[in-house]
Amino acid sequence: MSNRKGLVIEALIRTVITVILVVIVLNIGKNAGEAAGLWGTSQSIKSLENLANKLNSPDLKDGDSRQELIDLEQGDALIGFSKDSKQLRCYGCQQIYGTAFSGSLLYYSITKPLNKECDNKACVCVCSKEFAKTSLSGEETKITCGSFSCRTLEHDITPKITLEAALKKRGIQIATYPYWENGFFFVRRKNVNTPLNGMMPPPDAITTTLYIEKKQINQKIFTAACPDIPCIKE
């Protein structure tokens, strides 16, 4: 009888240990899967932090322009919003690809996030989830984002950044060049449905070369990021 009880207890202990080991293994697998999922945004978040730090750095003096690199995962966008704006607009950015036709200049609009980093402040954000466009309505196509990560900028972003110089250096000659209003806009294409920023060819590589700039105009300091200098025009 004593031996039988001992065997039952031993079997019970073995069962408990097995269950514990299975739970541990499942949790390890879950954490590994979550880590793999987060890895898709890690390069974009790193670029967000780096760009915000460079734009806020006192080493970037009035009149300075510097070349920088950012890495974006497929389908992610890095977007700057000016202080008093409610949205970034990308004028002519869909027409340059021949995906929309109109006698007027069409635009994408991206609503500025309602968070502490952007509330009544200039900010730069990464959209790393559900970056998508809606259907054209009038002259506007709204762009939506399922998840923004943002950092505050110490100085406002210049009101308008034209892509003319950058596109001309790539041999693009058109009547009206795309431009960004109330911010800046970089994206890495994932598929044909990814909203693009007006640069040709469409950005597919993980690494994007850009320029940052700081300039004082009428006693106010502006910063900007753009595909090619000059970013800020008086």
Image (tube, rainbow, N blue to C red):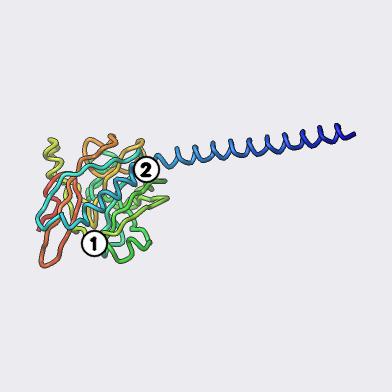
The quarter of the rendered structure image containing the C terminus is bottom left
Q: Quadrant of residue 97?
A: top left
| Viewer-nearest residue: 179 or 77 | 77
Residue flagged by tag 1: what amino acid is it?
A: Glu
Residue found 27% across the figure and 51% down from its top: 107
Looking at the picture, which amino acid does disc 2 mark? Ser
Q: Which residue is mark 2?
A: 42
Give residue 167's position: percent from left, percent from top: 15, 40
Residue 58, above or below 7: below
Mark 1 lies on a secondary structure that is: loop
Residue nearer the viewer, 24 or 184: 24
Horizontal side of 139 relative to 163 (left or right) equals right
Q: Crowding at label 1, few (<14), some or many (≥20) Cα neighbours within 10 Å? A: some
**Location of mark 1 (residue):** 154
Q: Can you tell which quarter of the image residue 99 is in?
A: top left
Q: Secondary structure at mark 2?
A: helix
What distance separates the C-alpha of mark 2 from that of mark 1? 24 Å
Does residue 86 lie above or below 39 as drawn?
Answer: below
At label 2, counting other C-alpha atoms closer than 10 Å, the crowd grade (few under 14, some 14-19, many 20 or more) is some
